[in-house]
Amino acid sequence: MPLGILVCSLALPALASHVSADNGGREANGQPIAAQVQRETDALAFTVPGFKPGRNSDGDAKLLLQDVSFDGAAVSTGSLHVRELSDGVQEITGEAPKVGVWKFAVNDAADGYYALGERFNSLNHAHQILVNSSQDNPAAKGTDTYKPIPFYMSTTGYGLWLDTTAEATFDLNVTSREDVWVSVPGKKLRIVFIAGPAFPKILDRFTALAGRSILPPYWSFAPWVSRDYYPSDAEVEKDIQKTRDLGLPASVVLIDSPWATGYNSYIFNPKQFSDVPEMIRNIHEKGYKLVLWHTSWINNRTKTPGEVGFADKIDVESSNYKEAAAKGYFVKDASGKPYAATWWKGQGSMIDFTNPEAKAWWQAQLENVVAQGADGFKDDDAEGNFQGSARFADGTDPRLMRNKYTVLYNNAVEEVLQKKLHGNGILLIRSATVGDHNLAFLWGGDNEASFSTENGLPTVVTAGLGAGLSGMPLWLADLGGYLKTASTPDPRLFMRWTEYSAFSPVMETISTANLDPWDYGAEALGNYRKYAVLHMSLFPYLYAATQEASRTGMPIMRALVLEYQNDQRAREAKDEYLFGPDFLVAPVIDENTSRVVYLPPGEWVNYWTGEALQGGKIVIADAPLETLPLYARASAIIPKIPEDVMTLVPGDQSGNTSIKSLDDRRVYELLPEAADSGSVGITDFEGRNLTRSAHSLTIQGKPADVTVRWRFGKVHSVSVNGSEITVQNGADGPYVEFRHKDHTTIAWN
């Protein structure tokens, strides 16, 4: 059912009516799409299908967009253009003669407002004021974020997207408990109302407009090897070899800062790496891909490096700075000179991506690094707080560039990867908003290695779920916490963070203490191995969830409110989540060895013990240090790969002949059946269709060497396509192995 609109027109000559001809939208300027009752003299009235009034609501099943103003002057709704973009999606636009401040209200008193980007303090933002501003804040985050998204979902049953890269403000029932007030700098105003009422439908419709995540290459989902810095190529070799020797799966090596002669010269530093071609060849031959750190700054005054042994190894002025300055490739200050500002590596200037020549010049340097063997980039920095009074070549008002700069930066890098690697490269980005939120992996910035509720592990869990609600499904955090504390290395914290990271898109360990997994002690290393192997084995499950994200916007880490929005306990849960469709993950985010877990409605199975549990209630989960509270839906089919796979990089891309890589062996794990289970079906990441009923499983699709395992099950005899097959016993339950061609039926009793 579409959102219904009634328009009341009061002319305001100062503003021009904005009429769009694209998208084939159905216009409603003065002509209501559906008959409604007008409640205000100057407002747009929206009917919300499935309306759920909040506790402070007056109960009327309509929303009013009202009190629109520009620079303090009232704007009539007759000056706005309204059209239906698609079923359930309404667009409202206006245009002013200059950049100014738009303001409007939505009379909503919802019990909850969700999304608005990666926020570290809460998922429900009711009675908060949030700024759509990308900020670099290594301290307690509060409501700050590296990744603001000007979109929210209301428990009333709708979503609102304000299409802007400016620093809008969302006042969510703070100034008025009956109204959401929004203000935004801009010349043009574009508001999109999205009907639900279900949150997955709203998120689907939003991401269809704003963009869905691209599909990263397989190898990027394996654990990453990284340190805060590598003093030499010998240390790189040490880490990649020790990872293999210890039986730790990994497919990516991240060389963070520094690695170049200067920040960001894009020339490998011979004072740091004695033989760059040999180092890169060795990385690839051991089954890894190479990702390099950088930012959009080029330094003219580098501060003395804090990394041990680097005091005389980094150029004070990067070798490419003078050329960029002479050719006008930097953003400018008010006098027209390169805008120079301080960031954490010293003083430098930012590339002006609104200047096509500057962008092409900069991209050529990245292309040279890719030609030497880089497979991706870690895009650091570019938050709006670094811009100050910078001026841009295309004349864009600085107020509109506060978040847009990161979009231009990250997309410029992605263009290089697409051009040179044809989709087989990866980005890991820190700052984002709509426009670059869908460029693969995003990490949560600088978090403290602690259990702090202000900047530690608990805040990371919440931020990742908020990112998912905002259309950023491939979010991750530095495993162990990036910022060291007095207690670093803390084995207990590292173990708990490891357990959480195993059920995120990527496990990437990095710390300012420059530690590896084996630096936290034998127990922590064993725990890391256990969960890294589990994470790797779940690659087919994880990638299928990523494919779903690319189709519908559904995140991989799913806040419970996303699927259970009318369940009060699910609304309040900010430290447990669904991982894909069938796992419930409840990380331990403090020093305890048990925790409260809310099991949403349905039948669940403890993944470690096989205990059957009925949902819709609270349980107390025992959680010894090595145990993550983890549950799976009863009757679930979990697609996996064998646990001996150590890299997801194909041998023909690396020259690797000794490290076990992804092949055509596939494992399908069957969880105990639900009491009321009918048939259950999935489509795996390679397009195979699997259907499970009481005592049978059918597989259709691509050939593979298949293992079917009954986790916690008991089977006495099994037939494959009518022929009896030997049942083997394993630690995780009985299993059978066979060659699947195109259609296989497995039956058992």
Image: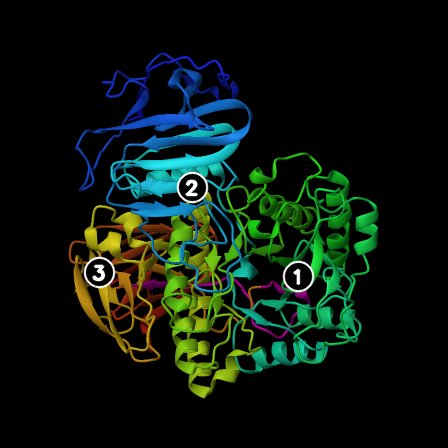
Q: Quadrant of residue 219?
A: bottom right
655 in the magenta segment? yes
40 in the magenta segment? no
In percent of width and height, residue 289 lies at 63, 64
Q: Residue at x 52, y 32 (%)?
A: 186
Q: CA distance from mark 3 to mark 2?
A: 35 Å
Earlier in the chain: of badge 2 and badge 1, it is: 2
Earlier in the chain: of badge 3 and badge 1, it is: 3
Question: In the rendered image of this protein, does residue 408 appear above or below residue 265?
Answer: above
Q: Residue at x 25, y 58 (%)?
A: 635
In percent of width and height, residue 243 lies at 57, 78
Badge nearest the viewer, 3 or 2? 2
Left or right relative to 534: residue 673? left
Q: Residue at x 50, y 54 (%)?
A: 146
- In terms of secondary structure, where does tag 3 sit? strand
599 or 727: which is nearer to us? 599
Instruction: Name the residue carrying label 3.
Output: 599
* Residue 205 visible somewhere in the drawing: no
Earlier in the chain: of badge 3 and badge 2, it is: 2
Q: Residue at x 32, y 32 (%)?
A: 106
Mark 3 neighbour density, 10 Å: few (under 14) some (14–19) many (20 or more) = many
Badge nearest the viewer, 2 or 1? 2
Please give the range of residues in magenta. Answer: 649-670
Instruction: Name the residue carrying label 1.
Output: 653
Q: At label 3, which amino acid type do we have? A: Leu
Point out which mark residue 169 bears: 2
Q: Quadrant of residue 64?
A: top left
Q: CA distance from mark 2 to mark 1?
A: 47 Å
- In terms of secondary structure, where does tag 2 sit? strand
Q: At label 1, which amino acid type do we have? A: Gln
In percent of width and height, residue 273 lies at 76, 74
Left or right relative to 352: residue 150? left
